[in-house]
Amino acid sequence: MSELELLPQLESPAQLGEYTDEQLLQLASEIREVLCTVVSDRTAHFASNLGVVELAIALHLVFDFERDRLIWDTGHQVYPHKLLTGRYAEFHTMRQRGGLMGYPNPNESDFDLFMTGHAGASVSSVLGLKVGDDLLGEDDRKAVAVIGDGALPSGIVFEAFNNAAGLGKDVLVILNDNEMGICPRVGGLASTLDKARTAPFYDGLKRDVQAFLNKVPVVGQPVENVLGGLKDAFKAFLHGGMLFEELGFRYIGPVDGHDLFALRRYLDMVKNVSGPVLLHVFTEKGHGFQPATQDPVKFHTPAPFQRSDDNEVIAVPSASAPSAPSAPAYTNVVSDAIHAAMQADPKVVVLTAAMCAGNKLDRVREDFPDRFFDTGICEAHAVAFAAGMAKAGLKPIAAIYSTFLQRSFDQIFQEVALQGLPVTFCLDRSGLCGPDGPTHHGVFDLSYLRPFPGMTVMAPGDSHDVEPMLDFALQHDGPVAIRYPKTAIETIERAPRRVTLGTSERIREGRDGVFLACGSLLANCVQAADRLAEEHGIDAGVINARFVKPLDTDMLQQVFAETGFVITVEENVLTAGFGSAVLEAAADAQLDTRRVQRCGLPDQFIELGDRGELLQLHGLDVDGLIEVARSRTTAPTALVDD
Ligand SMILES: Cc1ncc(C[n+]2csc(CCOP(=O)(O)OP(=O)(O)O)c2C)c(N)n1
């Protein structure tokens, strides 16, 4: 990075105006160089960022985002924007604890307005900003949302389009169309956008438009006239454009998103158009780094990789990359279990909301194409869709990350739980989600699922639990959620036991107290119990709770009758989580709740960081659990010679 000339000097996007065209192009290549260097040594979003380098520069050239409003949607493609807004010096800290977040973060910069990581809300938020600015007498402030074609189908986007057109507000939505979500985009809207891109006249049209634009002044009424004239041509030819026109937006484009100067002209032009405008920009995911353009799925968030000096040949990420865990991940074990269930029962279907790759469902998609459904980034729809399938007699598995399932809270309530329908939710990334940070930690699901009557909530403690839990769920006549984190799955030596509704599993007896472990932290509890015995003479039992709802109340009675401390351990916020369920049940049964100590995540948004680091920080690692047990043991016998 030492040979970079411009980026290290760029403290504010206001400086861009002083750059020559040649320097702007150089800046684009410096940004790509930094992206390649920084992202190659850690897992981070990559191909999407390479694709928006010119767009980010052009936006900061044309607008003044010290005043104007900009939201990147989803937010994972915000890296060039970060580099352009004075964060080059810290860029190497990207996605490390205490460092830059891989998403917009208002705590880092005033140029980041919202902390976003969930797709689709940008148009609504930008519309709100515009209405707010107008009402507060600051109507000179422009409002811009950049949204990917993967995020576009989220229902909320269309709610916002509808509202914006109704209000006639001056909002600019830039559709960053790279033909991809994480995987190739799906659905009817995808086909519509495909048509726009494959239109044989696109190139010619582009030339015409460019010729036109070179001749017209860039602001004011004449531009409006030109646009008015062009609109019909676009409408006639570009079906994608017609859709937005029908929704009440003025559709402009498509424009080549890697032609920095064309982008600048288009943005100059649309900047002063009144009413809601959609500018359609074609970009290439991974642009400028061939391996990423060739395999944008792998390079969406690649594991660390090496490049050669000529930027061509690389050692691509592989399973043997240093960060790859040796044990299989929960995700893989669950995906194998889903595959086995689909093989065994033709009624089993699986749904993903654009996370086929993340959920490792590729093999399921290939082997059972008729029973695999990718809804796109539409979690609310996916859940109601699953409910319909369940009503019809299928056995749907909705495989949705914990954090994204929050989008479908109401569908879980009304379409699934209220109807008592047998939908199985597989909540991957439940718990701490590591370097993605607060937008992605799945630490609320126990709390948001527990209240629904009839909902069964389970958490596998180790690899032995996964398949029996899924089998149980698929036989159960009602909704079931299975939650598990993004980490390697442990296997605790024992004879696997059947999963029956509301029953826990005792892993080890203990005289002085017991750990009630919820799912992923079972192995830490077992290790803590081992060390408590060896190092401190404390005899702690361990129970694999398995069910958070219904809770094993017989087990609770026994535990309170037999032992000293009762330490609940969960990778969820303490509020309304597993420990709360234990406390509630214990209070209802008039047990001595003073013996209960809850270990879990505090009532705050958890920062980004490695999962291990965060567990340690919040006392959920083995040492932390030992400390709690010791503090709760009345007369520990020290066996070590300290
Ligand atoms: C509500 C929600 N669901 C799922 C995701 C996971 N996710 C992150 S980026 C992404 C693909 C986004 O595609 P697109 O908007 O086209 O951006 P691109 O990466 O192609 O630039 C998905 C599915 C998310 N961030 N938010």
Image: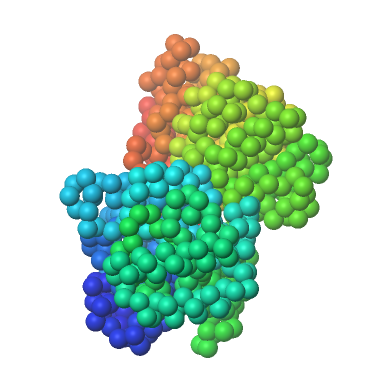
Q: Position of residue 66 (x, y in %)?
A: 23, 62
* Depth order, front residue of 118/467: 118
Decide: is 224 above or below 522: below
Q: Which residue lies furthest to the top in this view?
A: 590
* Depth order, front residue of 375/595: 375
Is residue 506 among what the camera can see?
Answer: no
Q: Where is residue 64 in the image (x, y as percent from the top left)?
A: 25, 66
- From the viewer's perspective, tell me whether residue 318 is left or right of residue 59: right
* Depth order, front residue of 219/609: 219
Is residue 628 among what the camera can see?
Answer: yes
Q: In which quarter of the image is residue 605?
A: top left
Q: Quadrant where the N terminus lies?
A: bottom left
Q: Name the residue at 49% across, 54% down.
A: 244
Q: Residue furthest left?
A: 137
Decide: is 354 above or below 59: above
Q: Where is residue 614 in the image (x, y as percent from the top left)?
A: 41, 50
